[in-house]
Image: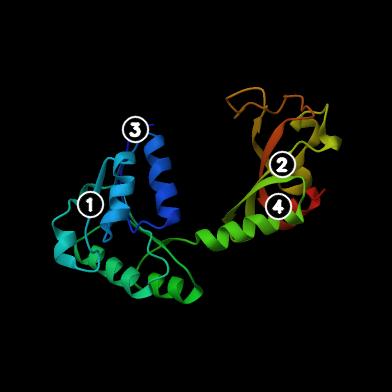
Amino acid sequence: MASKQFVIIGLGNSAIFLAKHLTSLGHDVMVIDCHPDKVQDISSSVSQAIVADSTRIKQLASIPLNKADSVIVCIGENLQASLLTVLNLKELGVKHIIAKSSSAAHTSILEKLGVSDIFHPERDSAISLAERLNRPNMLDFLPFMEGFSIIEIVCPEKFQGKTLKDLSLTHKYGIQVIAIRDPLESVPKIGNIADYVLKENDVLFLIGPNEALDSFKA
């Protein structure tokens, strides 16, 4: 995978995790925050760390933002700062803006400003936890699109010793297994897995309608 360039504005907890993980994946990450101590703390973990106030367009204008594949605004709690930053980025011609939202109202305003990529880390984490509590055999949960999700589960006992072809999950439930991970192997099995015989400790990644996924509750 080719390396990409990302700019992250605002250094809250989610932004720090995001910046470090993107860097670990081999991408070029620049972070921007108005607090020098936060910038200093992460400077050794990213490609570039800049002290700047993103609500001031003149300060942003001096930074080569248009070279980035995406600019991610991780300012969630300070609504005014978030919206001013987005407006400044649009004024500077940044094409792909991703923004963090902390509320339904925040999301609504971001959408009216033309931001289509909006994420809700606190909400999504809470939903993921609720789904894992709801399905005790589920390891993780990821909303995919309205009414659909991707879940990660330990292979149910009723699947063990059978192949995906035998189970015919797509035909019966509208659910598809997109990958299988054996805990003893570092690389998951993706593609050409219809004839793979499922084992007790296999981890299955399922995608499908939420109602159908409910049938896999423990």
Q: CB of mark 3 within 8 Å of CB of mark 4?
A: no
- Left or right side of 55 for 138: right
The quadrant in which residue 10 appears is: bottom left
Closer-to-camera residue (7/199):
7
The label nearer to you, 3 versus 4, is 4
Q: Amino acid at mark 3?
A: Ala
Q: Residue at x 72, y 42 (%)?
A: 170
- For disc 4, the marked residue is 132
Q: Circle 3 sits in a helix, a strand or a loop, which is it?
A: loop
Answer with the quarter of the image where residue 126 lies: bottom right
Identified at 38% across, 73% down, the residue is: 79
Q: Residues within 10 Å of mark 3 (few under 14, many from 20)?
A: few
Disc 1 from disc 2: Cα separation:
41 Å
Return the residue at label 2: 153
Q: Residues within 10 Å of mark 1 (few under 14, many from 20)?
A: some
What amino acid does circle 4 point to? Arg
Of the two numbered discs 2 and 3 on the same chain, state the one appearing first in sequence.
3
Is 26 located above or below residue 111 in the figure? above
Secondary structure under the numbered disc 1 in the rendered image = strand
Q: Which mark is on residue 115?
A: none
